[in-house]
Image (cartoon, rainbow, N blue to C red):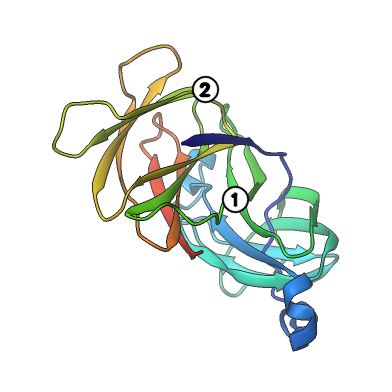
Amino acid sequence: MIRRSFVILVALVAIALASFLAPAPAQAESRAKVYVVHGIPGRDLRLQPSLPVDISVSGTCALRRLKYTKTVGPLELAAGSYDIRIHLSASPTTPPCSGPVAVSKRVSFDRGESATIVAHLTADSKPTATKFVNDLRPARAGNGRIMARHTAALPPVDLIVKPLRDPRTIAVIRNLANGEQVSAELPANQRFRVKFAPAGTSTPVRVGSVKARPGETVIYHAVGSVRKNTFTLIELRIRQ
């Protein structure tokens, strides 16, 4: 019921270039659908908490002042590779994409894939980005699909899943490292408590609440850090 998907470390991308976002109808099915999640808290970098960022694609400014915990998408992109830079945005009056570069990567997308690019912290609190492929397989009747992504400034963790008002454990996902994800089916429209515990222990460092929904993949991104009290979950819902 639970499938771990290892992912490659790539780049944050929010490509809003008009030439990419206006495909002809016959081309739409061959294009990738890309979501973007901003999960780098400015407080961890000793900057303003919302940490607005601009994103340039091959030298063209594509997205401006995306703030911490915000999501964008889906953006439709032609299959291929892109050079991406994430710029710190100092203020609304600063020329876009002119700030310091926090992440510079090359990222590729396949024909027809659904993907999310997450800007986040590494386990040792450095800014980075990871590409994840979204699991949009329909769940069985009565269930919904949940995905959990470890993109927080934490070492490998065990995820312990329990019903909200029930002490029994229904699932344990072990040794999930920063930059990895898991996919599972859970009963739809019920709240579950997820404990994040250091791998091999049962003492949680954080507890979050998740809910599966019929006909959707609901993705929870663990971001931020415990040390700076910026840990949170960012939800992204995608129709299957």
Q: Residue furthest front?
A: 141
Q: Residue furthest top?
A: 200
Classify residue 67 as left or right of residue 53. left
Vertical placement of 10 versus 162: above or below?
below
Q: Quadrant of residue 25?
A: bottom right
In the rendering, at what x and y percent does residue 87 appear?
Answer: 69, 58
Q: Residue at x 47, y 53 (%)?
A: 48
Which of the marked residues, 1 or 2, is nearer the chain's N terminus? 1
Q: Quadrant of residue 72?
A: bottom right
Instruction: From the viewer's side, name the closer residue of 180 and 68.
Output: 180
Q: Secondary structure at mark 1?
A: strand
In the rendering, at what x and y percent does residue 186 appear?
Answer: 35, 44
In the rendering, at what x and y percent does residue 58 appear?
Answer: 85, 65
Instruction: From the viewer's side, name the closer residue of 49 and 23.
Output: 23
Circle count: 2
Q: Tell me, for residue 118, which label it has, or none.
A: 1
Vertical placement of 213 versus 39: above or below?
below
Vertical placement of 181 versus 115: above or below?
above
Q: Residue at x 44, y 61 (%)?
A: 216
